[in-house]
Amino acid sequence: MHEPLKIAVIGAGAHSAENHLPALQRHAAEHPGEITLAGLCDLDIERAQAAAAKFGFAAAHGDWREMLERCAPGAVIAVTPSSITAHVAQEIMRMGMPLLMEKPLGATIGEARAVAAAALTCTAPVMVSMNRRFDPALRAGVALADDRPVTYLRATFARERRDEPDFIEYTAIHVVDAVLSVLGDVAHAEIVTERRHGAPWYFLHLRFAAGGYAVIEVMPTAQCNAEAYELTGSGYRVSARSGWFDTGVVQLYEGNALVHEERIDPALPAWVRNGTLAETAAFIGAVRAGTRVSPIPAEVLNAVELCHTAARRV
């Protein structure tokens, strides 16, 4: 019988507190004996202490290296600012600890490539937090395609007012990675940008080595929030609207007939509807079983490269 997997988390800021920490707390409650929440670290020790008390961690720390030395965890989740992500990730890799790291892979494309290369030679598994791969609506939509080839995929990623210059590299990378996870390697890319409502919008036209085609619409200042995917193949179409912002809906059309519809309960916490809980379970399950984690940094690097290129087209 497995001993509980000791988990330590680096970072107790807003993103961690709204996603990773409640997901870990729920997993621990629903799967007794699988994990122990051994330590939580933040440079703001009072924030770490408050979050540790709220989410059930055994100890709070102000220094992540000290925490790892004291806790000796079996896995680490690093939710760090992009300026230090690559450095922290590579140091944990050298320690040989299983790691779930936040995106992006680094503050620069060089750092991202270095992280991807280092992870390939690391003795412990390294997974990147790309929770849209685990979005319940998208996963249900892909399942409804039932292994039939996807000829065309359209993805929409809209936000109300997000005018930060790194939006596509630090946030919209989620939708780019999700599309690549469905269709595979990109053979050719055309990127169109234009400014609307004070920020650049991005339209990625992608042709894939396996034959599919995708259009990704990234609209940071669309004055509404939405994430949606449409998968089309011979004789069928799947529409998957993420439940993060409203009621998620997944529909399957065979020919012109709607043959299946399911909804994502809007009462579920956002960290369930956006895939974080399922992602957490996948990481824990793989580490405990000694099986492969996914996505690894090398699997995310193509999306990183595309977003990096798009950001420099403005």
Image (cartoon, rainbow, N blue to C red):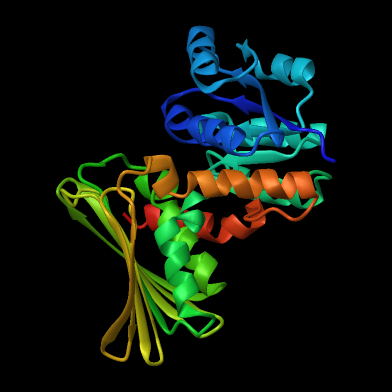
Query: In screen coordinates, is 244 left or right of 114?
Result: left
Q: Is residue 68 above or below residue 133?
A: above
Residue 260 left/right relative to 79: left
Query: Is 32 in front, or is 10?
Result: 32
Q: Quadrant of residue 79?
A: top right
Residue 8 at x, y = what percent?
A: 67, 26
Is any part of residue 114 visible from this angle? no
Picture quadrant of residue 253: bottom left
Residue 145: x %, y % from top left: 46, 79
The tally of labels here is: 0
User: Residue at coordinates 20% horizontally, 45% vertically from top-left?
Assistant: 160
User: Is residue 288 visible to us here?
Assistant: yes
Quarter in which the N terminus is drawn:
top right
Residue 207 vs residue 40, the one in the foreground? 40
Q: Quadrant of residue 258?
A: bottom left
The residue shown at (52%, 35%) is 20
Quadrant where the C terminus lies? bottom left
Report x, y in % for residue 193.
28, 61
Residue 95, image x and y in percent?
81, 31
Front in this rendered view, residue 5 or 230: 5
Q: Is residue 217 above or below residue 50?
A: below
